[in-house]
Amino acid sequence: MVIPMGRVADHSVAAGWGFAEATFFFVVPDVWTSWVGLRRPRRALTCCLSALGGAMTGGTVTYLWSRRMPERTTRRWMAKVPAVSEQMVVEVEAELQHEGHRSLMRGPTRGVPYKLYARASGLQGRSLVSFLAWSVPARLLRFAAVTLLASGAAAAAHRAAPRLPEPAVSMVFAGCWSAFYLWFFRTLSRR
């Protein structure tokens, strides 16, 4: 299952996916950047920058939306996103209240969606510039780490089995992400 795409298309998908995940979509753009990394590791890393740009744009939209909508409405909408509960939304509000925007750095390590920090920042009237500044390391580090891991695993697999057919690589990739999301939804649904 090789999707032939050019550089512009790869970056466009990364940016669009980053935007979508920062608003209401629930699958991380790392899925796309790591897919690109299976075949084009350098391009995949630059796609991380496109995903970051899309995420920051989507984060800005979520931030501004949260400034203009009632708190209960935004909380209810966020809690409709798969693997997000009202309790998680409330926890991010409290975390941001106590730690400020540096709390964005811990979100990726705990499976807390970026959109919840964007919402809480807007709701609390925090600086959009500060939110975006902290977004760069919080998003880019994870995007790059996952993408490098996928690229490295693909390179190691090709060295170990140079005649490994493309469909097998695609199936392993899909299986790994499917397993991750099964675990992720089960784990977060218990929170």
Image: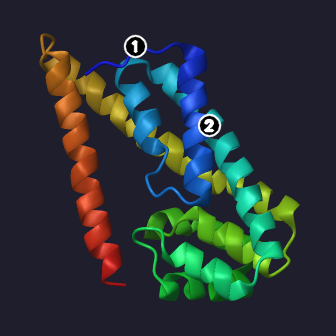
For residue 190, the mark is none
Instruction: Tell me the quarter of the picture where residue 68 sits.
Output: bottom right
**Label drawn at residue 4:** 1
Depth check: give the residue in front, 178 or 164.
178
**Left or right: 101 as drawn, with respect to 148:** right
Q: Quadrant of the N terminus?
A: top left
Residue drawn at (65%, 49%) of the image:
55
**Amino acid carrying mark 2 in the image:** Ala
Query: For residue 31, what is the image quadrant?
Result: top left
Q: x, y percentage for residue 151?
A: 37, 29
Q: Is mark 1 on a helix, strand or loop?
A: loop
In the image: residue 183, left or right of residue 69:
left
| Residue 95 coordinates in the image, percent (x, y) | 63, 84
* Residue 133 seen in this snapshot: yes
Amino acid at dot 1? Pro
Q: Residue 104: x percent and y percent?
A: 64, 67
The residue labelled by disc 2 is: 15
| Badge 2 density bin: few <14, some 14–19, many ≥20, Cα 10 Å | many
Estimate the spatial distance between the alpha carbons at disc 2 and disc 1, rounded to whole Å: 18 Å
Residue 123 appears left or right of 148: right
Q: Residue at x 14, y 25 (%)?
A: 168
Q: Tell me what residue is drawn at x 55 percent, y 69 percent.
A: 106
Q: Residue placed at 60% from the left, 52% from the top? A: 139
> Observer-nearest residue: 159 or 76?
76
Q: Where is 14 relative to 58, above or below?
A: above
